[in-house]
Amino acid sequence: RHCHLHRSAGQGGFFVTCDNQQTDEDMAVLTEEKKFTVQEYLEWEGFEPSFIYELINGEIVKKTSPHPQHQIICANMFRHFDAFVQSQKLGLILFAPVDVFLDEHNALVPDLLFIAEARKSFLIDNSVEGAPDLVVEILSPSTAKYDRGDKLKVYRKHEVREYWLIDPKLKSVEVYVYRNGDYDLDFLETEKGTVQSSVLPGFVLSVEAIFN
C-alpha cells in the first residue's frame, strides 16, 4: 500500500491519496511499542495486501476480511440508508473500506458512514478528512472492544453526531446520539422493533430488515 499525506488549503487540514485494500474482521495491534502519527502510519512499510489497517490512538491495528453475515448486514443497511439519503438529497452514504482521518493519531475505517451535503468537502480523493455525521460499526468478537471502547471515544472526541452499533450475534441495534459532550443511548432494540435517526429525521429502520 502506497500513501501520501497532503496539506489542504483553507483550514490547514490534510488529506491522503493511497491504494486501499478490501477487508475487515479479526484484529491485531501491530505497533504497541510506538505511538504513530498519521504521516508515520502512511509511510509504514508493514502493510500487507488483503488486509484493512486502522490507526487507533497511534496504534496500527490490522483486520482480516469479514464474514458473509457481516457483509449481508452492511449491504442491507447501505440499501436502506442510501435510498433515504438519495431520495432527499441529504448527502452521501459510504461503506468500508474508506479511510477517515480525524487527527494526527487516528485514521479509522467505519463499516458505514454518512456525510451531510453541506460537509461533502470532507470527501477528498480516496479518503474522508474530518468527522462524518453518522457512523455505523458492525461488531464481531474481536472488534467489539474497539468499537465500544477506543473507537467510540475517538468518535465522541470529534463529535460524530450519531453512532450505531450492530451486534450480529444478539441481533441488536444501539443508536447513540451526541449531546452535551457525550453519547446518549436513544435506541436499543433486539430482534424486533424499529430504530430511528436524529441526524436523518424521518429515517426509520426495522431491526428485522437489518438482519434479514
Image: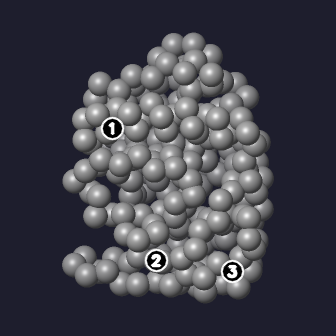
Residue 40 in the image: above or below residue 113? below
Nearer to me, 63 or 79: 79
CA separation, marks 2 and 3? 22 Å
The amino acid on which the numbered mark 1 sits, given as a three-letter code, is Val
Sequence-wise, the earlier of marks 1 and 2 is 2
Quarter of the image that includes the C terminus: top right
Task: Judge left or right: residue 69 versus residue 58.
Answer: right
Residue 196: in sight, yes or no?
yes
**Residue at (64%, 35%) from the top-left corner?**
72
Q: Position of residue 13 (x, y in %)?
A: 33, 77
Tell which tag, 2 or 3, sits nearer the viewer.
2
Residue identifier under label 3:
34
Instruction: Bin the neighbour count of mark 2 within 10 Å (Cα to Cα): few under 14, some 14-19, many 20 and up.
Output: many
Task: Give the residue type at disc 2.
Answer: Val
| Above or below for 198 versus 92 | above
Name the element at disc 2.
Answer: strand
**Quarter of image, res 33:** bottom right
Answer yes or no: is residue 102 visible.
Answer: no
Residue 16: give its label.
2
Instruction: Give the percent coordinates (x, y) of residue 179.
Output: 33, 40
Quarter of the rendering containing residue 47: bottom right
Q: Helix, strand or loop at disc 1?
A: helix
Q: Residue at x 47, y 63 (%)?
A: 100
Which residue bears the numbered disc 1? 85
Indicate the amino acid at tag 3: Lys
